[in-house]
Image: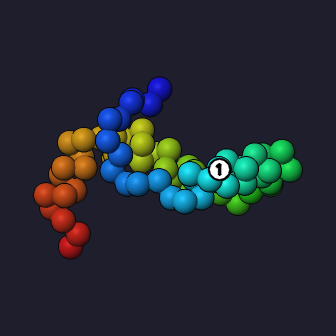
Amino acid sequence: MARFKLFRYRKPSVNSLLGVTRVKRTVKRKSGWNAVTRLTRAPINIKRTVLRRGSYYSGPMRFWRWLLGKR
């Protein structure tokens, strides 16, 4: 469950405020587009799952990556 944040890091886009994003997501879900693209997105999703389970996105790891920087 997501935690409630008092302040957002980024301001919402105009499309999000107008509800365009929600309509587009609903259309894609009802048309079956997500089911079709699930196969093509599988490698990216697997990589993201492995990184998440390996604690790549945890606080200490994010700090460690910031400390080392990109070399």
Q: Nearer the viewer, residue 43 or 38?
A: 38
15 left or right, relative to 1: right
Quadrant of res 65? bottom left
One can see residue 70 in this view: yes
22 left or right, relative to 11: right
26 left or right, relative to 5: right
Q: Secondary structure at mark 1?
A: loop
Q: Position of residue 16 (x, y in %)?
A: 57, 53
The residue located at (35%, 46%) in the rendering is: 8
The residue located at (39%, 30%) in the rendering is: 4
The residue located at (47%, 53%) in the rendering is: 12
5 left or right, relative to 17: left
Q: Position of residue 34 (x, y in %)?
A: 75, 50
Q: Is residue 1 above or below residue 63?
A: above
The residue sitting at the left extreme is 67
One can see residue 42 in this view: no
Q: Position of residue 26 (x, y in %)?
A: 75, 46
Number of marks: 1
Q: Is residue 51 above or below residue 2?
A: below
Point out the image quarter for the C terminus.
bottom left
* Mark 1 lies on residue: 19
The residue sitting at the front extreme is 18
The residue sitting at the bottom extreme is 71
Q: Nearer the viewer, residue 5 or 64?
A: 5
Quadrant of res 10? bottom left
Assess disc 1: are there few (<14), some (14-19) or many (≥20) residues with their C-alpha within 10 Å of its C-alpha.
few
Callout 1 amino acid: Gly
Q: Is residue 35 above or below residue 37?
A: above
The residue sitting at the right extreme is 31
Q: How is the image coloured?
A: rainbow
